[in-house]
Image (cartoon, rainbow, N blue to C red):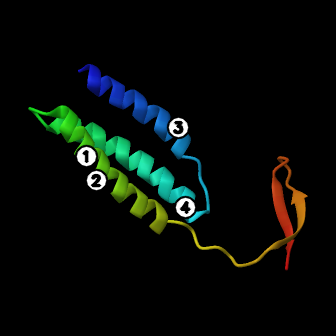
Amino acid sequence: MADLLRIFAAAGMAISVAACASDNPGDRAAGGAVIGGVGGAAVGAAVSNRHPGRGALIGGAIGAVGGAAVGAATTPPSSGRSCARIGYDEYGNRVCTAYY
């Protein structure tokens, strides 16, 4: 039970950091690997009766690989344009007002 609690605590911390959006395929793959690895470790530890440590390692490895693949595959396409002029919207957020 204590191992499962540690896994869920680590999952909460990892997801809070890994959930930051990025347009870079490498960053998205890393975030997906963290989320998938933690989720896979939790499921692996929960479903393996005799060896929860071994189940967590195997589940974490499978989840990390799958999460990295999905994270890299879901990277939004870039527009191919570069920003020429930066402006601000009514909320103070930076926005591109002209492209080249």
Q: Is residue 99 above or below residue 12?
A: below
Q: What whole-number distance in Å separates the C-alpha atoms at marks 1 and 3?
A: 21 Å
Disc with the residue nearer the chain's start (3 vs 2): 3
The tag earlier along the polypeptide, 4 or 2, is: 4
Give the alpha-carbon distance from disc 4 to disc 2, as whole Å.
Answer: 18 Å
Place residue 99 in its image quadrant: bottom right
Residue kind at label 2, given as amino acid type = Ile
Secondary structure found at label 3: helix
Going by the numbered disc 1, the residue's amino acid type is Gly
Instruction: Estimate the spatial distance between the alpha carbons at disc 3 and disc 4, rounded to whole Å.
Output: 18 Å
Q: Amino acid at mark 3?
A: Ser
**Extreme left residue here?**
50
Tell me the residue that label 3 is attached to: 16
Classify 10 Å Cα crowding around label 3: few (below 14), some (14-19), many (20 and above). Answer: few
Where does the image place residue 60, in percent across and percent down from the top left? 30, 45
Image-quadrant location for residue 1: top left
The numbered mark at residue 59 is 1
**Distance between mark 3 and mark 2 Cα atoms:** 21 Å
Name the residue rendered at 90%, 59% in the picture: 87
